[in-house]
Image (spheres, rainbow, N blue to C red):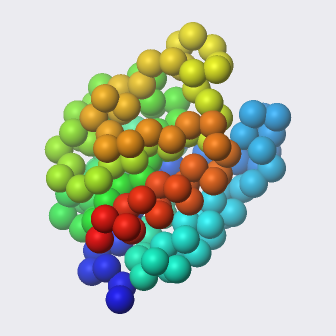
Amino acid sequence: MTAERPIFVLNGPNLNLLGLREPHLYGSATLDDVEQLCRSTAGQAGCEIDARQSNHEGVLIDWVHEARQSASGVVINPGGFTHTSVALRDALVTLEVPLVEVHISNIHAREEFRHHSYVSGIATGVIAGLGIAGYRAAIDYICRLQ
């Protein structure tokens, strides 16, 4: 049975460049590959996803506001906004559904400024460093809650 509301999969700035940007850190998978993985994982569990990507903070915030009414859960890779956006964090804290923060690389093994996340403290769970498989784990987790 398919959930009434999809899981929102939100990707922040520069994630549209997956497969091209720093493949030594992020691998060769593209954003399309990530979305296919999420759809497949969700479908196997009878769930659906609504996958979106933006390089614009305000657009991501608008989608989080939409998720408050429309989503059964949110998986977010905020990209660089992880470390900078109080505004995105303030939108995310209003969610009343599971929130999983995902990072393809291990942000704690990288530059010092990447060690702090404005999202982690309000997320249901955090997955970092598993490559795109982190998305699979996040979708699987939220689907199991439904």
Q: Is residue 117 left or right of residue 109?
A: left
Q: How many numbered marks are there?
A: 0
Q: Position of residue 87 (x, y in %)?
A: 28, 31
Quadrant assignment for the C terminus: bottom left
In the rendered image, which quarter is residue 135 located in? bottom right
- Vertical comparison of 117 with 73: above or below: above
Q: Position of residue 120 (x, y in %)?
A: 37, 31
Q: Position of residue 108 (x, y in %)?
A: 57, 21
Residue closest to the eye, 139 or 66: 139
Q: Position of residue 44 (x, y in %)?
A: 52, 80
- Vertical comparison of 92 with 82: above or below: below
Residue at 65%, 19% (x, y): give it: 110
- Residue furthest out toward the bottom: 1
Residue at 55%, 66% (x, y): give it: 38
- Vertical comparison of 127 with 32: above or below: above
Residue closest to the eye, 57 or 143: 143
In the rendered image, which quarter is residue 36 located in? bottom right
In the rendered image, which quarter is residue 144 located in? bottom left
Quadrant assignment for the N terminus: bottom left
Q: Is residue 85 visible?
A: no
Residue at 35%, 72% (x, y): give it: 6
- Vertical comparison of 25 with 54: above or below: above
- Residue furthest out toward the front: 144
Residue closest to the eye, 8 or 1: 1
Residue at 36%, 32% (x, y): give it: 119
Q: Is residue 32 visible?
A: yes
